[in-house]
Image: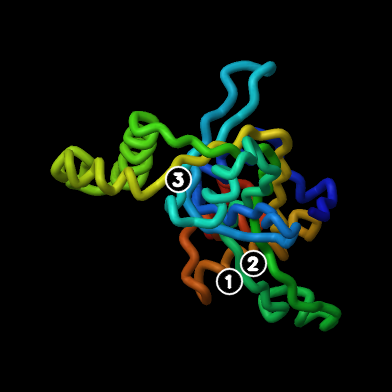
Amino acid sequence: MYQPPQFRLDRAECHRAIEAAPFATLVTREASGAPDADHLPLLLTPAADERSPDRLCGHIARANPLAHRLEEGMDEVEALAIFHGPQAYITPSWYPAKQAHGKVVPTWNYQVVHVHGRLRLIDDPHWLHEMVVALTERFESERATPWRVSDAPDDYIAAMCRAIVGVEITVERLEGKRKASQHKSLEERRAIYQGLRDEYGHDEQDATCLGGIPSSYSAGD
């Protein structure tokens, strides 16, 4: 991924981006060498210390060809997980410079994280059950009345788990990028922030991220 220094995210920022947008595009290679992509939520387990790797965990359908490739003797495969954060087209109509001299063009601002690592299959009923519980708790936690795995009959959950297999990525390299007009003037970034809020309806968090301005900024500043 092309990464100008001003757009690069550090490890902690990459972790926050993954936590905020955990639905990933998982890229691997077929036996022929052709690229293949799957789409699934992955939960991040940060390393306990500097000597240990971060890990990403999730599950795929047992019928998925990726599961078949791993079951056929490929203990691990090279994988790339891509996490897409907020993104938006940026119109030059928002720029103050449009009125001043007209030398402006459109762009696209976005946040993305690439996770490179080794992918392995986990076919263990207990691990899968714990993974399903963890995923459910992660995405139900903000609901007033969260649904829980225990709300469904045990035999039904067991049958559902038999139809999936776990996947785990041992992270070898993280690359994060936030292209948010950071190299532009604060006046221009404020205008982008306001346009994202007023014209596109982005919430404050996404508008702040894509506008490349301090999180403490508000429209009244």
Q: CA distance from mark 2 to mark 1?
A: 5 Å
Residue 85 in picture, x, y percent from top left: 57, 55
Q: Which residue is mark 2?
A: 192
Type of amino acid at the residue the image marks with label 2: Ile
Q: Which residue is mark 1?
A: 195
Residue 91 in picture, x, y percent from top left: 68, 77
In this picture the colour scheme is: rainbow
Using a 10 Å C-alpha cutoff, classify the residue at mark 3 as few (fewer than 14 neighbours), some (14 to 19) or many (20 or more).
Answer: many
Quadrant showing the C terminus: bottom right
Residue 122 in picture, x, y percent from top left: 48, 35
Q: Give the residue at x 60% y 64%.
A: 87
State the residue in front, 111 or 41. Answer: 41
Q: Which residue is mark 3?
A: 59
Q: Give the residue at x 84% y 51%.
A: 4
Residue 133 in picture, x, y percent from top left: 31, 37
Q: Earlier in the sequence, mark 3 or mark 2?
A: 3
Q: Give the residue at x 69% y 81%.
A: 93
